[in-house]
Amino acid sequence: MKVVKFGGSSLASAAQLEKVLNIIKSDDSRRFVVVSAPGKRDDQDIKVTDALIKYYKSYISEKDVTADQTWIINRYRSIIDELGLGQGILEKITKAIIDLANLPIDNNDFLYDTFLAAGEDNNAKLVAEYFRKNDLPARYVHPKNAGITVTSEPGNARILPSSYDKLEELCDSDEVLVIPGFFGVTVDNQVCTFSRGGSDITGSIVAAGVKADLYENFTDVDGIFAAHPGVVHKPQSISELTYREMRELAYAGFSVLHDEALIPAYRGKIPLVIKNTNNPDHPGTKIVLKHTGATIPVIGISGDDDFVSINISKYLMNREVGFGRKVLQILEELNIRWEHIPTGIDDMSIILRGRELTPIKEQEIISQLTRKLEVDEVEIERDLSIIMIVGENMKNHIGVTAKAAEAFSKKHINLEMISQGSSEVSVMFVIKTEQEKAAVRALYQTFFETE
Amino acid sequence: MKVVKFGGSSLASAAQLEKVLNIIKSDDSRRFVVVSAPGKRDDQDIKVTDALIKYYKSYISEKDVTADQTWIINRYRSIIDELGLGQGILEKITKAIIDLANLPIDNNDFLYDTFLAAGEDNNAKLVAEYFRKNDLPARYVHPKNAGITVTSEPGNARILPSSYDKLEELCDSDEVLVIPGFFGVTVDNQVCTFSRGGSDITGSIVAAGVKADLYENFTDVDGIFAAHPGVVHKPQSISELTYREMRELAYAGFSVLHDEALIPAYRGKIPLVIKNTNNPDHPGTKIVLKHTGATIPVIGISGDDDFVSINISKYLMNREVGFGRKVLQILEELNIRWEHIPTGIDDMSIILRGRELTPIKEQEIISQLTRKLEVDEVEIERDLSIIMIVGENMKNHIGVTAKAAEAFSKKHINLEMISQGSSEVSVMFVIKTEQEKAAVRALYQTFFETE
């Protein structure tokens, strides 16, 4: 049994929806379909979700909303007409869109969420109708009826653990169930949306709830590449990736699925595959708990910029009990999130994302380190990038770090810092941002082109 | 102007003292001589300091102390006789040794320190007398008169900052001043000893006080070797080392001078040289604030065992503000000193010295990490060694880490962890202790034998 999620670009037009229908029809075990709102058809297009935001803004500022409503309704209408669906579904969607402008504005914490969620919700109705018209028994299920009960945090809903039992009951259905992504319902029956990566989260939750054998996440790419295609020319795609490797790659620049979307599937031990709606025969990238066979040592190379290093030195620092903890306390009190703390003997660096260190916080840190901890020197180093080589199988290959370091050395790339932890799932290099692309290319050449 | 310190083996016999005299006579600028107590003449011998400890124990347990006194007096007598010094000095030393047994036992926090310090104190008198008899104008100076005023912490005295001004007055003397090492005097006129590395500390303090051009520390080795002679066959000796490099090397196994002994000289910006009394023409190893010329990238390789790693993993650890600080807080509350914290994305290791982690503390840490921080996994890894390559000039040489990692890889040595901090004074490798010697040899070969 499979849960299949389609992103906005897979649902943007009749032509795309035909591909979706064929994908579902081609495999009987695809029983649950989670849908996004219609995405852009081309670069000039507007996403339905963005049109809903505009509609919401007009409504709360008490402007005339007719044009906003019309644009959204017409967007659905064009898909309905192209697909040759009946007037019934268009009337339903039209009513739902117009009814939004009857919701109370005052004391309504969930108004914005309800507007936004309409994109997915109405698309799910449309998709279910389209399936039925094409001899695929299907049924639209509202998250309330599916059992997707969430916390009352507008824009940042979290699933309640009790939901999973209710979700499991969905398995009893003979029809394909079409569920709108991106939102759940609170115990008070309010529509409440997930954070970034919303529809992916819904798919992940449904997969965990129905104990799916596989969660298929259809996008518009053939899976995940071993390096960024904007940096490396035609990089290989990765056939199998563990959740852990995915997290490590995502950390430094890879952004196919949002972390939070992975948690329910990870916890439920559901494997996930990222596939391409436009090329469904491509096996895509499978994300698994454990690798199934022997793999190459390095599975992917990622790079991300805008890191900063706070370099601290103090003679005999290493004799001072609690020194490191005090440094981290200062950061915590300033609400600064750090990433890594490579330490020498009398020196310590704190690596953090550039956005964490505003000029005011920078001054405050320098002042506190100097005053409270009496450090000899503090230096702020900006414009750093983190490059990571990732692969769970690295630990079985001696010399991976040596090869990586040699690749840098040959290209005259200076390693500001290097850190390989005990997990041996990744090795992290800190370099100057100006050398980031050269570094990724050098590593790609070493680990993917010569083997 | 130079301050010269001699260790116990340089002062153990008349033959050794002749070398000392020649060293002082050969250079007019050697104006201050700091001496240890007479050391062992051979492997079977007893150090005067150890004989004093025995004497102290007999005295406080109210046993007959005659034998203890006689042994110590005879030890000085044999040197005095061999050197042909007069009875005057022997009588002075005899009286000083016997008088120890007249000191009050009760409510005397400084009794042990006073016994111990007698080894250095009487030796300074002897050395001054010997110098004078050999046409070298010299004078014994008690630390009280020198101005070495210290805190009232028996066995762990620390110099009072005000001492330095008084010490500077010593410069006015025309004679060579002979000062006993290892102890100072409290404001209440009590003898109070320094901790480990005591005479080295005195030398360092005097050098800083008189603003010496050089602090010469005479031992029985030709300086510091680039790697441990027990591991590498006939390693090169290092001609010049910065304080910083010295600290980094000392961290992982090098132990020529004790850290604390370096501080006054370091703060006073006094260069230091480690030389061999038995081979004074050898230039030895100079310890400086900054390198004077171009140097090789790696100046020394050290290795130390008995490290432990606590490996923690928790899914999405890296999203949790304050996680690292909480881990360090737990360690601090258990009074455990950590060394390094290499971090991955969802994992973190804490590297510490094995002695810090008693079985009880180990259980407590595992329990607290699991209970308070809800980690997914904690694993304790023992029998680890830290290998360090050290050199301030590494930062100007791209590829040092690559060469080191390659050297390990060729010898099939698996890197458990690797860390290169922003200072680039050292790169640290964590490996299994069983591979420590092979690792040091591989690095020595790479950085010292092929260049």
Image: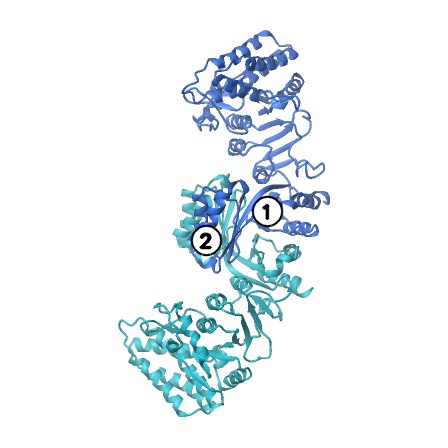
Chain colours: A cyan, B blue
Is residue A163 shown above or below B404?
below
Q: Judge by depth and name the residue closer to the eye, B146 or B325.
A: B325
Q: Are marks 1 and 2 in contact (CB under 8 Å)?
A: no
Among the 4 quarters of the image, the one containing residue B44: top right
Q: Judge by depth and name the residue closer to the eye, A201 or B238.
A: A201
- Determine crowd level at label 1: few under 14, some 14-19, many 20+ residues with C-alpha closer than 10 A: many
Residue B305: give x, y in percent of width and height. Answer: 60, 42
Q: CA distance from mark 1 to mark 2?
A: 29 Å
Name the secondary structure under disc 1.
Answer: strand
Q: Give the residue drawn at x 65%, y 45%.
A: B434
Q: Look at mark 2 in the image and give the residue it sits on.
A: B370
Residue A244 marker: none
Can residue A43 be seen by looking at this rendering? no
Read off the chain for label 2: B
Is residue B358 shown above or below A113?
above
Read off the chain for label 1: B
- Determine crowd level at label 2: few under 14, some 14-19, many 20+ residues with C-alpha closer than 10 A: some
Q: Amino acid at mark 1?
A: Met
Q: Judge by depth and name the residue closer to the eye, A19 or B167.
A: A19
Q: Look at mark 1 in the image and give the residue it sits on.
A: B428
Sequence-wise, the earlier of marks 1 and 2 is 2
Q: Amino acid at mark 2?
A: Thr
Can residue A191 be seen by looking at this rendering? yes
Residue A319: give x, y in percent of width and height. Answer: 49, 39
Residue B245: give x, y in percent of width and height. Answer: 59, 40
Q: Nearer the viewer, mark 1 or mark 2?
A: 2
- Please state, as top left, top right, bottom left or bottom right, where the C terminus of chain A lies in the image: bottom right
Name the secondary structure under disc 2.
Answer: helix
Q: Judge by depth and name the residue closer to the eye, A404 or B193.
A: B193
